[in-house]
Image (cartoon, rainbow, N blue to C red):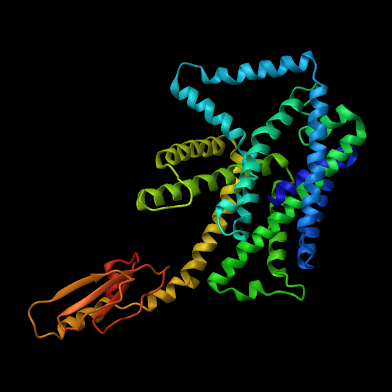
Amino acid sequence: TACISAVSAVLNAVSFFPAVAQSQPSVVAIVLTIIWAIAGLNILGIRENARFTFMIFIFAAFVILNLIVSGLFGLNAESFQKITYAAQESFKPLQTGSFFRNYDNFISHVAFCILAYSGIESVIQTAGLVRNWREIRKAYQFLAVTVGVVTPLVAALALSAPINFKEHEGDLITYFATTLNGVGFGMLVATLASLTLIMAVNTAFVASSELLDRVAHRYGFHWLIATNRRQSLYRIHLINAAFFSIIVLITHGSQTILADMYAIGLIASFCINLFSLIIYRYHMGTKEVIPYFTNRLGTLVLWVIMLSCFIFLAVDKPHGTMLWAGVTSVVLVAGMLVARKRAPEIKEIGQGDSDMDMILYLAGSAQSDLHLIFRRPREEALGLAKDNEVYITFYSPRQGAPPKLAPNHFRFPWTRLGLYQHIL
């Protein structure tokens, strides 16, 4: 998010300066400057406030409405012909007569538009600021309106205009605004786009710092969450800025490659979240009461569609796939290595009992009948302790070890250890 937002902000800002726009080193330098400037503002403790953000959104709504109205008044016979032809052609790939070919075309159409749903992360980020998901329902409704109405409308108006799209791939909307109301309005749209995209860069810094803060607390990296006098997680911000800069340098500031990486990563997160929801719903059944109803069959169908989109993009965008896979693999391997050494579950596993403790306890009984009684972690009442009875509780290390209620109460963690490791 930070990388592609910074690159897009620069491309919109320099669209009126061809000499700078055509110089890739200059664009990369400006992008890196924006990234490190945002990092510096966060280190200094200078953050966005609600009033400033609200003013920006009001200004953005005013400009976008003017753009839409101007575009509607600027429609002519040729524009209507293009829109009609596009609408007719969009349904032809779904009428081939073959289910598999229709499905393939449907998946390709959905996959190419997946970046339109990137705004959902802004809503998810606010989840920690409210008591439940119902309180941010309006945020989802606003997102649905912008993604489902405003974005397609602006795109249709711009694509129906007589523009050379290859020459204005990075500043299409800005150039479209210029053709409607002149250079001044185009510069206003470019300024708005750059400003909102820079705010997206800051949002990425804030979200990443919150995530790394939780990771550091969980795995005991307290040196990483040290704060300065401004109560800023300056070390995390420096790491983020360095990481974002490396990605920009690797991709040479290419908006296309960054968009491919972003799309693949976004749809991969959708697939993972949906698959986790499917496992949870099928494991827990339908009796559990949850705030929102989630149909298991509908979720499964949606997951199949998202997985198909991921496979399509992975094959169609090899450069973005390789870069995304490389970055993801590095982070995943590092996380697994850290989890093996510093996971808090290790301490909870150590608080449990061993198999040999239970065997030795039963071996001390003089009776021939031995009783094994299994109990849930939350069951606390135990009867009179007998030397030929043992109570066994299996617990999840993530939930913590239950208290030992009696000498004949043995607690065993759920672990993936083989017989050899158990003997050791």
> In the figure, is residue 395 to the left or right of 55?
left
Residue 171, quarter of the rendered image:
top right
Q: Specify whether 114 is left or right of 81.
A: left
Q: Nearer the viewer, residue 362 or 248?
A: 362
Residue 244 x, y percent position in the rendering: 70, 55
Q: Residue at x 62, y 34 (%)?
A: 113
Image quadrant in which the C terminus is located: bottom left
Residue 363 lies left or right of residue 58; in this view the side is left
Left or right: residue 38 compared with residue 309: right
Q: Is residue 204 above or below residue 182?
A: below
- The answer to whether any part of residue 344 appears in the image is yes
**Count of numbered tags:** 0
- The furthest residue to the left: 368
Frontmost residue, 24 versus 114: 114
Which of 75/50 is in front? 50
Residue 23 visible in image: no
Percent x, y of residue 294: 45, 44
Residue depicted at 20% across the width and 79% down the height: 359
Q: Residue at x 74, y 46 (%)?
A: 253
